[in-house]
Amino acid sequence: MLFRRRARMLRWLMCGRVGPVWMWKALLLFVAIAFAGQLLGVIFSKSTVQPPARSIFSPPDAQGPSLGPCQPHNHIMFLKTHKTASSTVLNMLYRFGEERNLHFALPLGYQLGYPLPFNAHRVKGYRGPRVTEFHIMGNHMRFNKLEVEKVMPADTFYFSIVRNPVAMAESSFAYFKEVAPAFRKTKGLGEFADDPHKYYDPRLRNNHYARNLLWFDFGMDHNANFSIALAQRGEAMIRRAFKLILVSEYFDQSMILLRHALCWPLDAVVSFSLNARQQKPSSSGGMSGSWVGKAAAAAGVSVRVGHAQVKTAPNLSLTEEQRERLRQWNALDWYLYKAFNRTFWEEIDRFGHAQMEQELALLRMRREDLARVCLRDGGKPVEAHRIRDKNIRPFQSGLVKILGYELQPGLDNTTRAACLRLIRPEIQYKDLLDAKQFPRALPAQAPPGQQSQGLIGSAGGSLLRQDSSRTGERLVGGKAGGRMVLEGERDWDGSHLSRSNETLKQEKGRLR
């Protein structure tokens, strides 16, 4: 009886006071569905692949301020002068061309016949005027416009870069002291500046590094006696041939002007300084860890610089009087520098100083961003032997150490490839482009007795690789695998070269 009363009371409460049973069932079902939906949403939100973060190399950061409706220049000739930050400029050209699959006018070796005046047949793959379209030319040459015009299209944009001749002399002395007889005879640059005529002989090979090097690179007689008329004729010749002359001391401003002249995106002119020398000597390092040192060891040839023998930094100290004497000694270069420095600032006046400052700030901020992403230790240059990746160690030349960079670890493949382009040294970059442009089958393994013939000595005693199958040069006499003297070939000074089995000693010379 008691049980029945309680059951009736419960039915009354459910149906009368709280609601019917079906309502409770519907409510419970709704709560269950809502809970399940919320749970599934959390699961799916965690498991869904997130869109990749925007790359630092993606527009608009990479593009920079708008340049209007202009079209980028693809036909470019850069006269790579010595000791003027020209290796950094060449890296920009290499990057721009590689990213767009452009065709480079590459040398057979590493320089376009330098120090001989340029000849079109020094370009690998050249088969006559207008047979092959070349987009970019920029390796070291002694300028010869008529021959360049045989290689490059009529609408080519010509530009170059100059530097204060006193600063050039300091850098040249550091790099070429063992190469140029005029420098080799002296203890320091100041001693040379005190009496250049005492040490300089214009008949000796490689002494062009010691006097009016800019004038020489532009293809003119660097030993000519200075006169205003001669200097003006040289300046006029350069102005007719080149649309823009940059100034090394104002490199960032130069890059802004170049970007606008070529209608290039901002990233194309953002760079890290390449082939820079160490300002203070270090007690460790050397070439034994570089591919040059290993090649020399494999060939059984001694390398003067290594861990066991420290480079002695050259004495570059100068008094103000000695600086003035170097300006007089390099009077033709000093005239060119003053003339093109003046017109450089006239270009900036026309460009607008306010706009220049704005774009300089963007350029430098962009460089800092790329250094933070790409480079180890905040982008500080390091000695070559400290770079873990041996493929990006810079070639070592002269009595100074050439610095390079280390990539940031842990980069994704796309970012790493883009960062690597920014820091790849000149020699390795040229080899990479050469291999892409002229793919070839792997050479057969040379017999042990011939392996060392793939090395030749540069003018200063350092070793470089030479591959005759790569350069396409015909060997005359001797064994295959070395660079042999061509039939009837002459040296840079016009003298006949020997056809003995000795490897050619002066082909590649000094770089940068």
Image (spheres, rainbow, N blue to C red):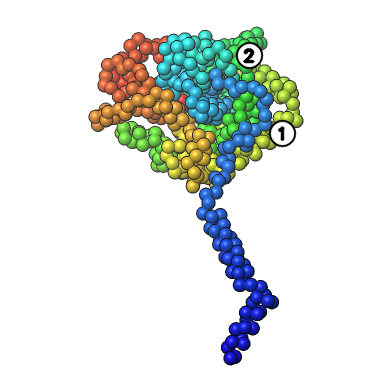
User: In this picture, is 233 found above or below 159?
Assistant: above
Q: Is residue 74 above or below residue 12?
A: above
Horizontally, is 65 left or right of 461 in the view?
right
Instruction: Say which residue appears at 54% left-offset and 58% top-offset.
Output: 40
Q: Residues within 10 Å of mark 1 (few under 14, many from 20)?
A: few
User: Between residues 54 and 260, which one lies in front from this camera angle?
Assistant: 54
What secondary structure is found at the residue carrying circle 2? helix
Question: How many numbered discs?
Answer: 2
Residue at the location (54% across, 28% down)? 96
Element assignment for label 1: helix
Which is nearer the eye, 196 or 159? 159
Dot 2 or dot 1: first in sequence order is 2
Residue 258 in the image: state x and y as whole percent: 63, 25
Q: Which residue is label 1 attached to?
A: 358
* Local crowd size for mark 2, using a 10 Å CA cut-off: few (<14), some (14–19), many (≥20): some
Q: Of residues 135 and 395, which is closer to you in this image?
A: 135
Does residue 312 appear in the picture of this structure?
no
Residue under pointer 2: 239
